[in-house]
Image: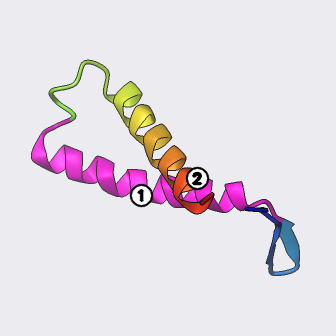
Amino acid sequence: MRFSEINLFGVYVAPISIWIVAAWVLTIVLRRVAVRIGLLSLVWHPALFVFAIYTIVLSSIVLLLAR
């Protein structure tokens, strides 16, 4: 698939930047769920765990949209 720039109010934006923001929002939601159920208190390094989840979410979005 060919990824082309997205016209956002007259500014051409790379598609990956939109996906980065979407992954960030989804990671915030997942982090709040993890805090609510107590998962973050069980991991060794919470910030590293959240970063790993962000990486997984972003790579999943890219792989799903690249088909």
Q: Is residue 53 above or below residue 64?
A: above
Q: Looking at the image, is 50 positioned above or below residue 10?
A: above
| Residue farthest left in this picture | 37
Residue 34: assigned label: none
Give the answer, above or below, for where 23 lies relative to 46: below
Q: Is residue 66 a member of the stretch shown in magenta?
A: no
Q: Nearer the viewer, residue 7 or 29?
A: 7
Which of the 4 image quarters holds residue 49? top left
How crowded is the residue under tag 2: few (<14 C-alpha within 10 Å), some, or many (20+)?
A: some
Left or right of 30 on screen, residue 24:
right
Q: State which mark lies toward you, 1 or 2.
A: 2
Secondary structure at numbered mark 1: helix
Q: How many marks?
A: 2
For badge 1, the amino acid type reads Leu
The magenta segment: 13-39
Q: Give coordinates of residue 6: x percent, y percent.
A: 79, 72
Q: Quadrant of the N terminus?
A: bottom right
Q: Quadrant of the C terminus?
A: bottom right
Measured in 3D between alpha carbons, the distance from the residue under mark 1 to the one under mark 2, in whole angstroms, is: 14 Å
Residue pointed to by mark 1? 26
- What residue lies at 79% left-to-right and 62% top-to-bottom? 2
Q: What is the magenta segment's predominant secondary structure?
A: helix
Give the image quarter of residue 50: top left
Instruction: Please rate how many residues cluster around mark 1, counting C-alpha atoms within 10 Å: few if below 14, some from 14 to 19, many from 20.
Output: some
Q: Quadrant of residue 56?
A: top left
Q: Which residue is mark 2?
A: 62
- 50 to the left or right of 20: left
Q: Residue furthest bottom?
A: 9
Question: What is the secondary structure assignment of the residue under circle 2?
Answer: helix
Residue 29 among magenta residues: yes
The residue at the point 48 percent across, 49 percent down is 60
Residue occupying image coordinates x 39% and y 39%: 53
